[in-house]
Image (cartoon, helix red, strand yellow):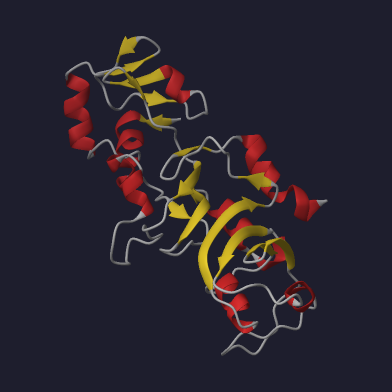
Amino acid sequence: MARLDRLLANLGYGSRKEVQALARTGAIVFDGQAIKDTGYKVPISAELPQRLTIGGAPVDPPAPLTLLMHKPLGVVCSHREPGRSVYELLPRRWRARMPALSTVGRLDLDTSGLLLITDDGPFLHRVISPRSHVAKRYVAELARPLRGDEAAVFAAGELMLEGETDPLAPAVLEVLGERRARLTIIEGRYHQVRRMFAAVGNHVEALHRDRVGRLDLPDALAPGEWRILTPDEQAAIFAESEA
Protein backbone atom coordinates (compact mmCIF):
# COMPACT_ATOMS: atom_id res chain seq x y z
CA MET A 1 0.00 0.00 0.00
CA ALA A 2 1.15 3.55 -0.65
CA ARG A 3 -0.18 7.02 0.04
CA LEU A 4 -1.69 8.44 -3.12
CA ASP A 5 0.27 11.71 -3.00
CA ARG A 6 3.60 9.94 -2.49
CA LEU A 7 2.87 7.40 -5.21
CA LEU A 8 1.89 9.99 -7.83
CA ALA A 9 4.82 12.24 -6.94
CA ASN A 10 7.18 9.29 -7.42
CA LEU A 11 5.57 8.60 -10.79
CA GLY A 12 6.32 12.13 -11.92
CA TYR A 13 2.84 13.67 -11.77
CA GLY A 14 4.12 16.62 -9.75
CA SER A 15 5.07 17.50 -6.20
CA ARG A 16 2.86 16.25 -3.40
CA LYS A 17 1.35 19.73 -3.20
CA GLU A 18 0.62 19.66 -6.94
CA VAL A 19 -0.95 16.22 -6.60
CA GLN A 20 -3.18 17.54 -3.81
CA ALA A 21 -4.33 20.38 -6.08
CA LEU A 22 -5.05 17.85 -8.83
CA ALA A 23 -7.11 15.73 -6.46
CA ARG A 24 -9.28 18.69 -5.48
CA THR A 25 -10.43 18.96 -9.10
CA GLY A 26 -11.75 15.39 -9.02
CA ALA A 27 -9.23 14.25 -11.65
CA ILE A 28 -7.95 11.31 -9.59
CA VAL A 29 -10.29 8.34 -9.73
CA PHE A 30 -9.75 4.96 -8.04
CA ASP A 31 -12.16 2.09 -8.68
CA GLY A 32 -14.65 4.54 -10.16
CA GLN A 33 -14.61 6.96 -7.21
CA ALA A 34 -12.98 10.41 -7.21
CA ILE A 35 -10.32 10.57 -4.48
CA LYS A 36 -9.82 14.00 -2.99
CA ASP A 37 -7.89 12.91 0.11
CA THR A 38 -4.36 12.27 -1.14
CA GLY A 39 -3.51 10.52 2.11
CA TYR A 40 -5.70 7.68 0.80
CA LYS A 41 -3.70 4.45 0.50
CA VAL A 42 -3.85 2.37 -2.67
CA PRO A 43 -2.49 -1.12 -3.27
CA ILE A 44 0.56 -1.29 -5.55
CA SER A 45 0.18 -4.00 -8.17
CA ALA A 46 0.42 -4.58 -11.91
CA GLU A 47 -3.34 -3.94 -12.14
CA LEU A 48 -3.08 -0.40 -10.77
CA PRO A 49 -3.43 1.28 -14.22
CA GLN A 50 -6.76 -0.51 -14.64
CA ARG A 51 -8.01 0.82 -11.30
CA LEU A 52 -6.52 4.32 -11.03
CA THR A 53 -6.95 7.07 -13.61
CA ILE A 54 -5.59 10.61 -13.76
CA GLY A 55 -7.66 12.98 -15.84
CA GLY A 56 -9.40 10.01 -17.42
CA ALA A 57 -6.16 8.27 -18.48
CA PRO A 58 -4.72 5.15 -16.79
CA VAL A 59 -2.01 5.95 -14.28
CA ASP A 60 1.51 5.11 -15.39
CA PRO A 61 2.72 1.65 -14.31
CA PRO A 62 4.40 1.65 -10.89
CA ALA A 63 7.90 0.34 -10.27
CA PRO A 64 9.41 -2.04 -11.14
CA LEU A 65 9.10 -1.02 -14.79
CA THR A 66 11.17 -2.28 -17.73
CA LEU A 67 10.85 -0.96 -21.27
CA LEU A 68 11.89 -2.38 -24.62
CA MET A 69 12.95 0.38 -27.03
CA HIS A 70 14.08 0.41 -30.64
CA LYS A 71 16.84 2.96 -30.20
CA PRO A 72 17.23 5.12 -33.29
CA LEU A 73 20.49 6.52 -34.59
CA GLY A 74 21.51 9.94 -33.36
CA VAL A 75 20.41 9.70 -29.72
CA VAL A 76 22.55 8.98 -26.68
CA CYS A 77 21.90 6.74 -23.68
CA SER A 78 22.98 9.19 -20.99
CA HIS A 79 21.64 12.29 -19.29
CA ARG A 80 25.17 13.68 -19.21
CA GLU A 81 26.24 13.40 -22.84
CA PRO A 82 25.49 16.28 -25.21
CA GLY A 83 22.69 15.80 -27.70
CA ARG A 84 19.24 14.30 -27.62
CA SER A 85 18.84 11.32 -25.27
CA VAL A 86 16.66 8.21 -25.33
CA TYR A 87 14.86 9.58 -22.27
CA GLU A 88 13.42 12.35 -24.42
CA LEU A 89 11.54 9.67 -26.38
CA LEU A 90 9.58 8.79 -23.21
CA PRO A 91 6.75 10.79 -21.57
CA ARG A 92 8.24 13.96 -20.10
CA ARG A 93 7.01 13.24 -16.59
CA TRP A 94 8.91 9.94 -16.57
CA ARG A 95 12.14 11.89 -16.13
CA ALA A 96 10.92 12.68 -12.61
CA ARG A 97 10.06 9.07 -11.67
CA MET A 98 11.55 7.65 -8.50
CA PRO A 99 13.29 5.28 -8.65
CA ALA A 100 14.75 6.74 -11.82
CA LEU A 101 14.78 4.94 -15.16
CA SER A 102 18.19 3.90 -16.49
CA THR A 103 19.36 2.20 -19.65
CA VAL A 104 20.60 -1.37 -19.25
CA GLY A 105 24.04 -0.83 -20.73
CA ARG A 106 24.43 1.59 -23.61
CA LEU A 107 24.28 1.84 -27.35
CA ASP A 108 26.36 4.68 -28.71
CA LEU A 109 25.16 7.57 -30.84
CA ASP A 110 25.80 5.70 -34.09
CA THR A 111 24.32 2.34 -33.00
CA SER A 112 20.64 1.45 -33.30
CA GLY A 113 18.53 -1.42 -32.05
CA LEU A 114 17.29 -3.20 -28.96
CA LEU A 115 17.66 -1.18 -25.79
CA LEU A 116 16.29 -2.00 -22.35
CA ILE A 117 15.37 0.78 -19.91
CA THR A 118 14.44 -0.02 -16.31
CA ASP A 119 14.02 1.22 -12.75
CA ASP A 120 14.63 -2.32 -11.45
CA GLY A 121 18.17 -2.29 -10.06
CA PRO A 122 18.56 -6.06 -9.50
CA PHE A 123 17.30 -6.77 -13.04
CA LEU A 124 19.70 -4.22 -14.54
CA HIS A 125 22.72 -5.66 -12.73
CA ARG A 126 21.73 -9.21 -13.59
CA VAL A 127 21.64 -8.38 -17.31
CA ILE A 128 24.98 -6.58 -17.39
CA SER A 129 26.87 -8.81 -14.96
CA PRO A 130 29.61 -10.83 -16.68
CA ARG A 131 28.57 -13.79 -14.55
CA SER A 132 25.16 -13.87 -16.23
CA HIS A 133 26.68 -14.49 -19.69
CA VAL A 134 23.73 -12.75 -21.37
CA ALA A 135 24.48 -12.72 -25.10
CA LYS A 136 24.07 -9.58 -27.23
CA ARG A 137 23.77 -9.92 -31.01
CA TYR A 138 24.72 -7.21 -33.50
CA VAL A 139 24.54 -6.83 -37.26
CA ALA A 140 27.51 -4.91 -38.64
CA GLU A 141 27.92 -3.27 -42.03
CA LEU A 142 31.64 -3.12 -42.83
CA ALA A 143 33.83 -0.81 -44.84
CA ARG A 144 35.88 -3.62 -46.36
CA PRO A 145 35.20 -7.23 -47.40
CA LEU A 146 35.65 -9.87 -44.73
CA ARG A 147 38.99 -11.61 -45.17
CA GLY A 148 37.72 -15.04 -44.10
CA ASP A 149 39.42 -15.80 -40.79
CA GLU A 150 37.41 -13.46 -38.54
CA ALA A 151 35.09 -16.17 -37.20
CA ALA A 152 38.04 -18.27 -36.04
CA VAL A 153 39.82 -15.27 -34.51
CA PHE A 154 36.74 -14.15 -32.58
CA ALA A 155 35.89 -17.69 -31.43
CA ALA A 156 39.36 -18.41 -30.07
CA GLY A 157 38.98 -16.31 -26.93
CA GLU A 158 42.47 -14.90 -27.44
CA LEU A 159 41.79 -11.58 -29.17
CA MET A 160 43.27 -8.59 -27.35
CA LEU A 161 41.80 -5.14 -27.83
CA GLU A 162 44.13 -2.18 -28.04
CA GLY A 163 44.92 -0.77 -24.62
CA GLU A 164 43.62 -3.81 -22.70
CA THR A 165 45.41 -6.63 -20.90
CA ASP A 166 42.70 -9.31 -20.80
CA PRO A 167 41.65 -11.22 -23.91
CA LEU A 168 38.03 -11.18 -25.03
CA ALA A 169 35.70 -14.06 -24.29
CA PRO A 170 34.89 -16.21 -27.34
CA ALA A 171 32.37 -14.63 -29.70
CA VAL A 172 30.34 -16.03 -32.58
CA LEU A 173 30.52 -14.50 -36.06
CA GLU A 174 28.04 -15.32 -38.82
CA VAL A 175 28.85 -14.08 -42.31
CA LEU A 176 25.81 -12.48 -43.97
CA GLY A 177 27.55 -11.04 -47.01
CA GLU A 178 30.86 -9.81 -48.30
CA ARG A 179 30.74 -6.77 -46.03
CA ARG A 180 27.98 -7.76 -43.62
CA ALA A 181 28.15 -9.94 -40.53
CA ARG A 182 26.26 -10.88 -37.38
CA LEU A 183 28.31 -10.97 -34.18
CA THR A 184 27.21 -12.38 -30.81
CA ILE A 185 29.19 -11.41 -27.71
CA ILE A 186 28.74 -12.07 -23.99
CA GLU A 187 30.69 -9.08 -22.73
CA GLY A 188 30.03 -5.37 -22.86
CA ARG A 189 33.34 -3.62 -23.13
CA TYR A 190 33.56 -0.07 -24.40
CA HIS A 191 32.73 0.02 -28.15
CA GLN A 192 33.55 -3.68 -28.18
CA VAL A 193 32.10 -4.70 -31.55
CA ARG A 194 33.69 -1.78 -33.39
CA ARG A 195 37.04 -2.43 -31.73
CA MET A 196 36.89 -6.15 -32.53
CA PHE A 197 36.52 -5.47 -36.23
CA ALA A 198 39.22 -2.81 -36.03
CA ALA A 199 41.52 -5.45 -34.51
CA VAL A 200 41.14 -7.57 -37.65
CA GLY A 201 41.72 -4.66 -40.02
CA ASN A 202 38.16 -3.56 -40.75
CA HIS A 203 35.87 -0.68 -39.89
CA VAL A 204 32.20 -0.77 -38.83
CA GLU A 205 30.15 1.67 -40.88
CA ALA A 206 26.76 0.78 -39.37
CA LEU A 207 25.84 -1.23 -36.27
CA HIS A 208 22.47 -2.54 -35.09
CA ARG A 209 21.65 -4.71 -32.07
CA ASP A 210 18.79 -7.11 -32.78
CA ARG A 211 18.86 -9.52 -29.84
CA VAL A 212 19.64 -9.71 -26.10
CA GLY A 213 19.62 -13.24 -24.69
CA ARG A 214 16.76 -14.85 -26.58
CA LEU A 215 14.78 -11.62 -26.77
CA ASP A 216 14.54 -10.33 -30.34
CA LEU A 217 13.78 -6.77 -31.33
CA PRO A 218 10.21 -6.95 -32.70
CA ASP A 219 9.89 -6.15 -36.40
CA ALA A 220 6.80 -4.04 -35.64
CA LEU A 221 8.70 -1.72 -33.28
CA ALA A 222 9.91 1.21 -35.38
CA PRO A 223 12.98 3.29 -34.50
CA GLY A 224 12.14 5.56 -31.58
CA GLU A 225 9.20 3.42 -30.44
CA TRP A 226 9.04 1.58 -27.13
CA ARG A 227 6.72 -0.56 -25.07
CA ILE A 228 6.61 -2.23 -21.67
CA LEU A 229 8.50 -5.51 -21.51
CA THR A 230 6.29 -8.50 -20.66
CA PRO A 231 7.27 -11.06 -17.98
CA ASP A 232 7.79 -13.71 -20.69
CA GLU A 233 10.09 -11.39 -22.63
CA GLN A 234 12.02 -10.60 -19.48
CA ALA A 235 12.51 -14.32 -18.85
CA ALA A 236 13.68 -14.80 -22.45
CA ILE A 237 16.66 -12.55 -21.79
CA PHE A 238 18.09 -15.13 -19.42
CA ALA A 239 16.80 -18.31 -21.06
CA GLU A 240 19.98 -19.05 -23.00
CA SER A 241 22.39 -18.33 -20.15
CA GLU A 242 20.39 -20.59 -17.81
CA ALA A 243 19.94 -23.43 -20.30
Look at 62% across and 66% down and name the residue there: 179
136 relative to 94 in the view: left or right: right
Look at 52% across and 52% down and name the residue there: 113
173 relative to 28 in the view: left or right: right
> Toward which corner of the image does residue 18 lie, by quadrant?
top left
Instruction: Tell how many labels.
Output: 0
Q: Nearer the viewer, residue 181 or 240?
A: 181
Residue 5 percent across, percent down from the top left: 29, 32
> Toward which corner of the image does residue 56 lie, by quadrant?
top left
Residue 224 percent across, percent down from the top left: 41, 44
Look at 30% across and 57% down and name the residue there: 84
99 relative to 129 in the view: left or right: left
Q: Is residue 4 above or below residue 10?
A: above
- Whether residue 205 is visible, yes or no, is yes
> Toward which corner of the image does residue 232 lie, by quadrant?
top right
Q: Is residue 123 above or below residue 164?
A: above
- Whether residue 64 is visible, yes or no, is no
Residue 156 percent across, percent down from the top left: 80, 78
Q: Is residue 159 above or below residue 148?
A: below
Can you name the residue that lies furthest to the top here? 32
80 relative to 147 in the view: left or right: left
Q: Nearer the viewer, residue 198 or 33?
A: 198
Residue 155 percent across, percent down from the top left: 78, 73
Can you name the residue that lies furthest to the right here? 243
